[in-house]
Amino acid sequence: MLRVLGRAASINVRKVLWTCAEIELDFEREDWGAGFKPTDAPEFLALNPNAMVPVIQDGDFTLWESNSIIRYLATRYGQAALYPTQAHARARVDQWIDWQASDLNRAWSYAFMSLVRQSPAHQDAQALRAGCAEWSRYMQILERQLAATGAYVAGDTFTLADIPIGLSVHRWFETPFEHPHLPAVSDYYERLSERPGFRLHGRNGTP
């Protein structure tokens, strides 16, 4: 059985858990990370030298990095609708997965640490205003994409790209600041909420 190492509250662990739900893949999860077994323990570092969750073990195969993990699981156990095999369709899915990691993630970092985590190191008012504005700018990019597709981020069907994007949208709505009106994003959030995997591992998870 697939072994998932990481606390369920982690947004990156939740990517893996939601993917498992979508492909109906059984797993065993162990709590590692903040408040649980330390990721700087030698036995964890032997699996991931970055000391970060999640890590999976699939038989004798070990993998870290959440987006690599969900791609692997979808490729090995999923259906083509989730992660297409056709080059153009797969590239579109990968584009939005990578955008979430490289652009959207960075945009919400300061605001999330300030307003949700209440980090003392992230309480500069000017930096917070700039962070909220930058986050809103990237969410408006997502708004335009969702308005164009009328459904999901990579097109008219749910794909692997909607898992990291959907979790980021949940974080957007759960972070307390004045959000611009984004009707396509709101509709998308409710559309995702019809999926049992998102209700279990996304919307009801800790931001």
Image (spheres, rainbow, N blue to C red):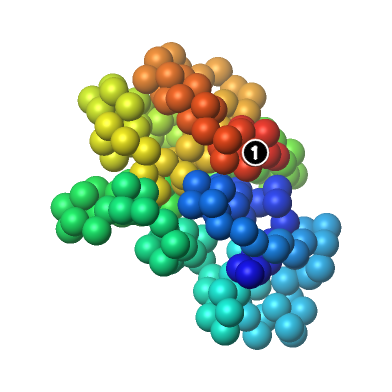
- Rendering coords of residue 101 (x, y %): 43, 52
The residue sitting at 64% across, 61% down in the picture is 27
Would residue 63 be visible to someone looking at this image? Answer: yes
Q: Is residue 191 above or below residue 171?
A: above
Task: Classify mark 1: helix, strand or loop.
Answer: helix
The residue sitting at 74% across, 84% down in the picture is 42
Q: Which picture quadrant has residue 134?
A: top left
Q: Which residue is mark 1?
A: 200
The residue sitting at 71% across, 62% down in the picture is 29
- Rendering coords of residue 168 (x, y %): 51, 39
Image quarter of the C terminus: top right
Image quarter of the N terminus: bottom right
Crowding at dot 1, Cα within 10 Å, few <14 / some 14-19 / many 20+, comes out as some
The residue sitting at 54% across, 28% down in the picture is 193
Q: Nearer the viewer, residue 148 or 3?
A: 3
Q: Nearer the viewer, residue 173 or 160?
A: 160
- Rendering coords of residue 180 (x, y %): 45, 17
Which amino acid lies under the numbered mark 1 shown in the image of this protein?
Leu
Horizontally, is 196 left or right of 154 in the view? right
Q: Nearer the viewer, residue 78 or 132?
A: 78
